[in-house]
Amino acid sequence: MTRLKPGDIKDIDAWLTRCDQELKNKTGCSLTGIACHALDCREDVFRKKISSVSVGVVPIASGQGIIGGFSTAVCAIAAHIGARAFVTGRHDVAGIAEAAGKGADVILMADDHRFVALNIREGRTVDNAEATALGFVAGLDLIAGGLKNKKLLVIGCGPVGRFGVFAALKRGADVSVFDTVSVRANRLKNEIEEKLKTSITIENQFHPALKKYSYWLEATNSSGIIDETVITPQTYIAAPGMPPGVTAPAAAALGNRYLHDPLQTGVAVMVAAAAPAKIRNNHG
Ligand code: PYL
């Protein structure tokens, strides 16, 4: 998992201020709307109930330690979708105890290996990789006018790409995958065949593959692998990968056909998915 840098998340407050309009221009939905689309729950009901959910964000100092601004950014995103969110004054176990003592329903915390939302009332965990994949596939579904029967290329078969394949298949997409490490692509193909009794296609050559697909989920930790020379007017990219796999000129060429953020979509879906069941079980 790529470790975010303080520079990646320094402008999240400003982004949240303008994000809903940008997202509405691209997807027709706000950040809350994308989270609800990802989880197939009704936004109007969700918005009424989410304010009852208390979210404690706990800085974790283990391993490489605390990332400046990370907990504050996570808290701002949780508050932006309507939860009552706070960052604990203490970190690690003392912070978890503080969050529970302050009545948190959900605790958000990340070490070097996992970033989870833990619903301490229901004993449920939501992982950032799965939530990020659900959110970006939902966003791509919205900007593409529906992924059903559309050929989608998932670039990167790591945790986010893998969950992205499951999410895209669930939306009826015809999924292909590419990974620089072929064993990862083959392992994912075998898992899909075993668990879902369906098949995905493995693309073995990156640039020739790009020419064959209009819809891409870029889920790698490779910077700048997609430049403006491979973008066409029919290209739609959802790009959760960090650092950004799409160059700035390519992003400019894509305009409203491009979704990327370093943390927001994943955290919004984590909080929504970890919220008590009574808030989410109102299918659209
Ligand atoms: C959750 C992000 C998304 C991409 N990479 C993941 C990452 O940076 N993980 C490490 C997060 C460490 C947080 C640190 C703190 O400030 O609590 N332990």
Image (cartoon, rainbow, N blue to C red):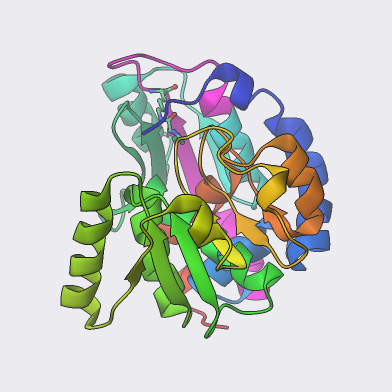
Report if residue 132 lies within the magenta region. no
Q: Name the one closer to the observer, 282 or 178.
A: 178
Which residue is rendered at x = 33% and y = 49% of the image?
Answer: 159
Q: Name the one closer to the observer, 79 or 227.
A: 227
Asked if 55 appears above or below 212 in the picture, the reply is: above
Asked if 244 appears above or below 213 in the picture, the reply is: above
Number of numbered tags placed on the structure image: 0
**Residue 14, picture quadrant:** top right
Q: Name the one closer to the observer, 45 or 68.
A: 68
The image quadrant where one finds ligand 1 is: top left
Which residue is rendered at x = 63% and y = 36% of the image?
Answer: 76
**Residue 157 placed where, x, y %?**
34, 52
**Residue 52 placed where, x, y %?**
55, 56
**Residue 20 placed where, x, y %?**
78, 53
In which quadrant will I find the C terminus?
bottom right
Residue 135 seen: no
**Left or right, 207 with reference to 43:** left
Which residue is rendered at x = 67% and y = 72% of the image?
Answer: 144
Report if residue 50 lies within the magenta region. yes
**Left or right, 62 with reference to 5:** left
* Magenta region, residue range: 43-72
**Residue 221 placed where, x, y %?**
45, 36
Residue 11 seen: yes
**Left or right, 234 with reference to 154:** right
**Left or right, 84 with reference to 19:** left
**Residue 214, picture quadrant:** bottom right
